Amino acid sequence: MILGIPKEIKVLEARVSLTPAGAQALVEAGHQVLVESMAGDGSGFPDAEYEAAGATVMDDVDALWAKAEMIVKVKEPQAVEIARARPGQTIFTYFHFAADRELTEGLLASGAHCFAYETLEVGRTLPLLTPMSEVAGRMAVQEGAKALQAPQGGRGVLLGGLPGVAPANVMILGGGIVGTHAAWMASGLGAQVTILDLDLERMRYLEEVMPANVTTVFSTRQAIRERLPHVDLLIGAVLIPGARAPKLVLREDLALMADRSVIVDVAVDQGGCIETCKPTTHENPTYVIDGVVHYCVANMPGAVPRTSTFGLTNATLPYVLKLASLGPKAAVLGNPQLATAANTLAGRLTNKPVAQAFDMTWETPESVAATL
């Protein structure tokens, strides 16, 4: 199969979907790999390394899209990329369709086969989402700590406090991968951390592995509102695979929060779990509503592209190899894991949570694949 690796064009997105080592693995498996010139520069991979790995470097991105049977990306296609997609072409990337109706309708109209990293399931895990969730969870604390600084508009609070000065209070909504890594980072810096979740088994696990300055609380609306007045940093880390995130903190709840406290909503790429969340960029990451600083960058791992690109390729490469070898039809019919990643096939929606988000009709991936 001919695979295309275009340069990411989302604002300040410097990740690339494949390392040179990943390109070499695909070439050795008998595939042709086309890489847009300078696609890897932001992650520290010059064109020469891809050429040494056996890939073909191309200056013309339109020609790359036109020639490639399968496009492998990091972020969802932007408008100009949706226009390049064509019927029968496979696209493998993070889509987060449930947060963007225009994206969903655009790619359905293209007729491309869209396989989403974030919905690929193995058992109860999401292995292609995990590495970027780990990065985002850790970055949520770094960025939240920065936003709390007075020059950034925050309260002027140091997460770990000082001898004789209380540490910051950090509340994390969700105890999954993002929440766990955020808790490790925040607690390691000395903050007082509270994780709210609905899964009792998960909370028992967290109680066992977390340090003493991390507490778990069963999540209810009352529990959230009771704690908001004491929170310096609120981190939204809720995930329902493939679906829009539920709104756990409403606009009216901001009145309970301290002036210039900070919200970091990692769930922004799935619509956000804070009602006042709206996507921002690394260029302009924050805004203020009702005296509360909001950090809602939709591609947080893009700020650390080299680390993120290694982590992403480590996770995605085995599935890129399988999808390239099988093709979309055989992948859906013969590989249950890749079937869970199929969100659209030949202009037909094959993901139930996305259909529910937009009140659309959907079909199972297997039923659609059988007609391809």
Image (cartoon, helix red, strand yellow):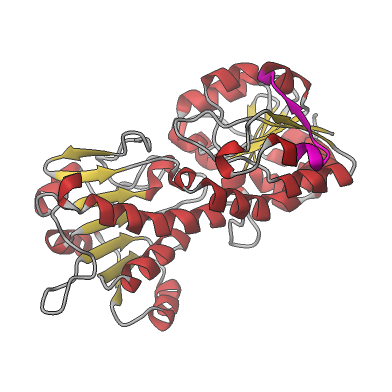
User: Where residue 350 appears, x then y in whole percent?
Assistant: 63, 36
**What residue is rendered at 38% in x and 38% in y?**
282
View extreme (right): residue: 30
225 horizontally vs 3: left or right: left
349 horizontally vs 206: left or right: right
Position of residue 316 relative to residue 166, above or below, is above
Report the magenta residues as a range: 50-61
Position of residue 351 relative to residue 122, above or below, is above
Residue 88, quarter of the rendered image? top right
Residue 207, quarter of the rendered image? bottom left
13 horizontally vs 368: left or right: left
Q: Choose between 270 and 351: the one closer to the eye.
A: 270
User: Where residue 353 appears, x then y in whole percent?
Assistant: 51, 42
Q: Is residue 52 magenta?
A: yes
**What residue is rendered at 68% in x and 28% in y?**
36
**What residue is rendered at 61% in x and 45% in y?**
117
Residue 330 seen anywhere in this rendered image of the structure? no
Q: Is residue 146 magenta?
A: no
User: Which quarter of the rendering shows the N terminus?
Assistant: top right
Residue 83 seen anywhere in this rendered image of the structure? yes
Residue 53, quarter of the rendered image? top right
User: Where residue 197 appears, x then y in whole percent?
Assistant: 36, 65
Position of residue 215 relative to residue 137, above or below, is below
Q: Choose between 15 and 44: the one closer to the eye.
A: 44
**What residue is rendered at 32% in x and 67% in y?**
186
280 horizontally vs 340: left or right: left
Q: Choose between 96 and 333: the one closer to the eye.
A: 96
User: Which quarter of the rendering shows the C terminus?
Assistant: top right
